[in-house]
Image (spheres, rainbow, N blue to C red):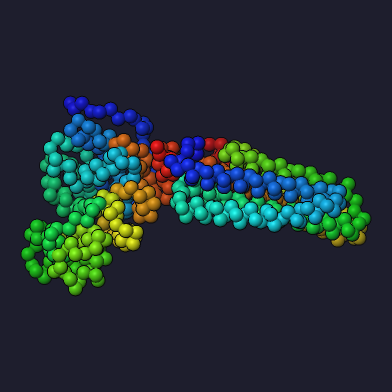
Amino acid sequence: MASEHLSKQYDNDLETLRSGVLQMGGLVEAQIRGAIEAFSTGNQAAMEQVIANEPGVNGHEVKIDIDCSHIIAKRQPAAGDLRLIMAISKTVTDLERIGDEAEKIARMSKQIHERGRVELQHFANIRHAADIALSMLRQALDAFARLDAAAAAGVIREDRAIDTEFRSILRQLITFMMEDPRTISTALEIVWIAKAIERIGDHAKNIAEYVIYIVKGTDVRHTKLEQVEREALG
Amino acid sequence: MVNTMSIPAVLARPAIHTDAETPATKAEAKDLSFYYGAFQALKNIGMVVHEKKVTALIGPSGCGKSTFLRCFNRMHDLYPGNRYEGEIRFHPDDTNLLGRDVDPIEVRMRISMVFQKPNPFPKSIFENVAYGLRVRGLRSRRAIEEKVEQALRRAGLWDEAKDRLQDLAFNLSGGQQQRLCIARALATDPEMLLFDEPTSALDPIATGIIEELIHNLKDKVTILIVTHNMQQAARVSDYTAYMYLGELVEFGVTDEIFIKPKKKETEDYITGRFG
C-alpha cells in the first residue's frame, strides 16, 4: 500500500483513520498504565482519572467507525484498502474493550484499597502480567502503524506468556484464600484484575491478527501459532 | 512477419488463482494474440471461461479487453488487416473458434453479443427478437411467437412489452432497449453471451435490472462481460480477469481478486491507484 490513490482525498481519509486508531491506542495504553498504578499504589487521583477518561475512549471508537462507514459508502474500497478498513473497524472494538478492562481494574483497585489490609508486595506478578499486556498492546499498535506482519506474529506468540502468568496468579491466590479466609474478598477482586489483564492480552493478540490480515490478506484468527507464523513470515 | 509495436512486458506469467471446485470449461483461449494491422493488441492470452458462470474482463482503456471479447464471436473478421494467432477452443465439441474452416456466422449463432449502446433494429419489438430466428430459417409463425415470448421473458421485458409488441423498438426506454437486445441475443439459444459494457449508457435503475438479469441468465448460458465499472464486475461476476497492455495480468475467483489480489498491478488498479 505504498503508492498513492488517484484521489488525494481518499489518501487523506485513510490516513485520518489510521492516525485515529493510533491516537486511540495511545489513550488506551495510558489508561492501562493509570489503572495499574492505581492498583499498585492506591493512588486515588489515578483511579478517578482512568474512570473519567473512559468515555473519551468510547468516543474514539464511535467516531472511527462512522468514518469507516463513510469511506465504504463513498469509495467502495477493495483489496488492501478494504482489508485495512475492515481491520480498523475491528481494532477499535478491541481497543474499546481494553479501555473497559482498564476501567474495571481501576474500580476494583479502588475497592481493594478502600477495604484496606492488603499486602500488595505479594502481587508483583500482577504488575508483571500487566507489563506483558502493555508491551503486547504497544507492539501490536506498532505493527499496525508499520504494517509489519512479522512483528504482529511476535505479539501473538507472547500471548502464551500472559496466559501462563494468569494461571500462576490464580494458584497463588487460591493458596492465600486457603491459608486465611479473611483474604477471600480481596483475593477475588484481584482475580478479576488478573482476568482483566489476561483479556487485555487477548485483545492485543486480536489486533495483531488484524495486522496480519491487512498485510497478507489471510485471516489467522482461530489458527495454531505455527500456522500464524508461517502466514506472517511467508 | 508483422512488425509489431513493442509492448512492455507487464509480467512473465499471469497470476492464475485456482478454485477449489473448478466448474467445466466452456471456452479456452490458448496463446491468443491479435493484431490490428501492425499493432499487437493482445499478447499470448491463456484463459479459461467457465461454463454457466459470469466472467468479467476489467482493465484500463486500451488494455485489450474489448478486443479479447470480440475474438469470441469473430467480430474482427469484419475489418481487413486484422489477424488472430493462437486459438479459442469452444466446448463441448472442442472447436477452434478462430479456425479458418469455421464459419463466423455459425460462431455468432452460438455466441451472441450485446453492445454498449442499445442497438435495436429499426423494426418492431417483435421483429427485433424474431429476426435471428428467421435468419436461422425458422418459418412457423407459432414457433417464432413462442420463441419471441420465451426470449422476452428471459430478458425480463415480457411484462412491459407484451401489449406493444408491434411498436417500434425505438419507443422503448434505453434500459428496455438494452433488454430487447439481450432478448434478441437470447432468441437463438446461444451457449455464450458476450456483453461489451452493457450498462454504461444506462441509469442506475436500468443498470440494476440488467445486472440482476445477468445473474439470472447464468443458469443457462456462459457469460463474458467487459466493464469499466469495477464494482459492477465485483457484483455480477464469478471470475474476474484483469488485463493491461494486451496481456492477462491476473485471473481468478472474483471474491479473491477484489479482496486479495496476487499481483500488485491488479491491486493498484482495483483500489484506484492506477496512474
The number of numbered discs placed on residues in the rendered structure image is 0
Q: Nearer the viewer, residue B90 or B221?
A: B221
Tell me if B88 is positioned left or right of A34 in this view.
left
Q: Which residue is drawn at 14% across and 35% down?
A: B81
Q: Residue furthest bottom?
A: B163
Task: Where is residue A176? Give x, y as percent.
Answer: 88, 54
Task: Where is residue B109? Give x, y as percent.
Answer: 16, 53
Q: Residue at x 31, y 35 (%)?
A: B245
Residue B52 in which image quadrant: bottom left
Q: Can residue B24 be seen in this view?
A: no
Tell me if B133 is positioned left or right of A154 in this view.
left
Instruction: State whether residue B118 is above or below residue B65.
Output: below
Task: Where is residue A132? Give x, y as percent.
Answer: 73, 43
Q: Residue at x 83, y 52 (%)?
A: A45
Q: Can residue A31 be seen in this view?
A: yes
Task: Where is residue A126? Give x, y as percent.
Answer: 80, 48
Q: Which residue lies furthest to the front in this view?
A: A9
Residue B78 in which image quadrant: top left
Q: Nearer the viewer, residue B143 or B131?
A: B131
Tell me if A75 is positioned left or right of A34 in this view.
left
Q: Residue at x 23, y 53 (%)?
A: B117
Tell me if A9 is positioned left or right of A149 in this view.
left
Q: Which of B201 and A81 is in front in this view?
A: B201
